[in-house]
C-alpha cells in the first residue's frame, strides 16, 4: 500500500479536487484506492455522498483521537493506494499526513500569495521529513487553477521548480473541475474527453513515476 498525502497551508488551492481526481484515476486503472478525509470541513465526504465515485471516502479526523490511533486507522485500510486529503494549515492533520506519506503532494495556485504559501509549506514538509530518519517520502508540487493562456500561468511552474522539488503537470483553471463536484463524480468520469481529464491522467502518470523513483519503491505492507 502506498500513501499520497495532499497538504497546503493555504486554503482553496484545489487539494480536495486533486485528491478526488487522483483516487478516481487510480481506480480507473484497476487499483483499489481509498480516500481519507482528514478535514473537519468534510468536503471529500460531501463530494462522495451521491455514492457515484466508485471508491471509498472515509472521514478520519486527527482531532478526535491520538495521532498514533489516527495513523493506525489509516494504515489498516485494505487498498493499493490511500489518498489523504487534509485541511488548510500546518496543524496536527498536516503533521500526521506527512508522517504517513510515501508521496507528499503540494498543490499551488497561480498567485504570488499562493507561491509564498507553497514555499512555506514545502519548507515545513522538508524539515518534518528530515527529522524522521526512517522516512523515504518524496515531495512533489502541482500547479493548480492555472490560466495557461497567460504568461503568468506559464511562470508558475518555473517559479515552483526553483524551490528544488519536482513540479508535476499543471491543472488549468477549468469549469469542468467545479461541475464534477456538483455531479458527485470525478472530472475523468464527468467529462472523460475534456482537457481537464487529460491533465488528471498526466498528473497521475507523474505521481506514479515519482513514487517508483523512491528507494526501490518498497510498499508499506507488501501488498
Ligand atoms: N483547477 C480548477 N479549476 C477551477 N476551479 C477549481 C479547480 N480546482 C479547484 N477548483 C474549485 O476551487 C474551489 C476550491 O477547491 P478545493 O475545495 O479542491 O480546494 P481545497 O484546497 O481543498 O480547499 P480547502 O482548503 O477549503 O479544503 C472549489 O470550488 C473547486 O471546485
Ligand atoms: Mg479541501
Image (cartoon, grey):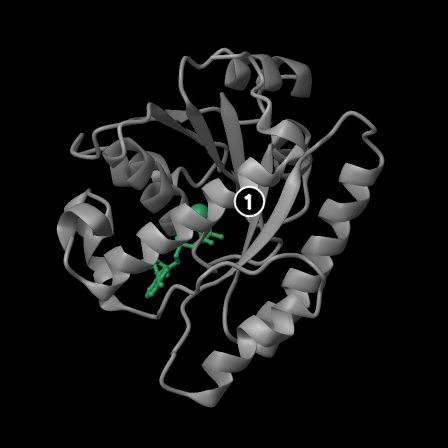
Q: Which residue does the image show at 82% across and 39% down from the upper left? A: 130
Please tell me which residue is depicted at 68% across the width and 54% down the height of the picture.
121
Apparent side of residue 188 relative to residue 80 in the rendered image (left or right): left
Q: Residue 22: image x %, image y %?
A: 37, 43
Could you tell me which secondary element the residue under label 1 belongs to? helix
Is the CB–ligand 1 distance for label 1 below 8 Å? no
Tell which residue pokes out farthest to the bottom in this image.
151
In x, y percent, where is residue 145? Answer: 40, 68
Q: Pick the residue in front: 191 or 88.
A: 191
Residue visible at 33% across and 59% down in the picture: 199
Looking at the rendered structure, the number of numbered marks drawn on it comes to 1
Task: Give left or right: position of 189 versus 151.
Answer: left
**Which residue occupies 61% across, 57% down?**
166
Task: Compare residues 182 and 78 and report the one nearer the observer.
Answer: 78
| Location of mark 1 (residue) | 210
Q: Is residue 48 left or right of residue 36?
A: left
Quadrant for residue 176, please give it.
bottom left
Q: Is residue 33 above or below residue 213?
A: above
When the figure is inspected, residue 47 is found, relative to residue 136, above or below; the finding is: below
Q: Which residue lies furthest to the front in this view?
A: 216
> 204 or 82, which lies in front?
204
Indicate the position of residue 127 as horizontal and vertical percent values.
Answer: 81, 45
- In the rendered image, residue 184, in percent from the top left (x then y), is placed at 19, 42
Instruction: Report crowding for label 1: few under 14, some 14 to 19, many 20 or more residues within 10 A (C-alpha).
Output: some
Q: Relative to residue 41, is residue 162 depicted above or below?
A: below
Amino acid at each position: 500500500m502506498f500513501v499520497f498525502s495532499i497538504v497546503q497551508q493555504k486554503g482553496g488551492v484545489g487539494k480536495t479536487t486533486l485528491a478526488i481526481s487522483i483516487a478516481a484515476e487510480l481506480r480507473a486503472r484497476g487499483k483499489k484506492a481509498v480516500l481519507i478525509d482528514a478535514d473537519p470541513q468534510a468536503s471529500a465526504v460531501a463530494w462522495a455522498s451521491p455514492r457515484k465515485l466508485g471508491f471509498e471516502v472515509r472521514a478520519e479526523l486527527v482531532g478526535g483521537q491520538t495521532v498514533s490511533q489516527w495513523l493506525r486507522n489509516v494504515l489498516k485500510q485494505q487498498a493499493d493506494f490511500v489518498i489523504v486529503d487534509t485541511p488548510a494549515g500546518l496543524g496536527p492533520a498536516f503533521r500526521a499526513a506527512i508522517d504517513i506519506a510515501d508521496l507528499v503532494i503540494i498543490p499551488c495556485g497561480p498567485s504570488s500569495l499562493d507561491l509564498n504559501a507553497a514555499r512555506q509549506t514545502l519548507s515545513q514538509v522538508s524539515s518534518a521529513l528530515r527529522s524522521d530518519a526512517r522516512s523515504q517520502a518524496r515531495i512533489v508540487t502541482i500547479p493548480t487553477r492555472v490560466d495557461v493562456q497567460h504568461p503568468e500561468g506559464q511562470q508558475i511552474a518555473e517559479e515552483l521548480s526553483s524551490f528544488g522539488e519536482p513540479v508535476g503537470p499543471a491543472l488549468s483553471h477549468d469549469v469542468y473541475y467545479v461541475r464534477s463536484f456538483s455531479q458527485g463524480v470525478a472530472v475523468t468520469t464527468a467529462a472523460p474527453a475534456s482537457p481537464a481529464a487529460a491533465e488528471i491522467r498526466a498528473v497521475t502518470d507523474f505521481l506514479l513515476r515519482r513514487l517508483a523513483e523512491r528507494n526501490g519503491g518498497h510498499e508499506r505492507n507488501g501488498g
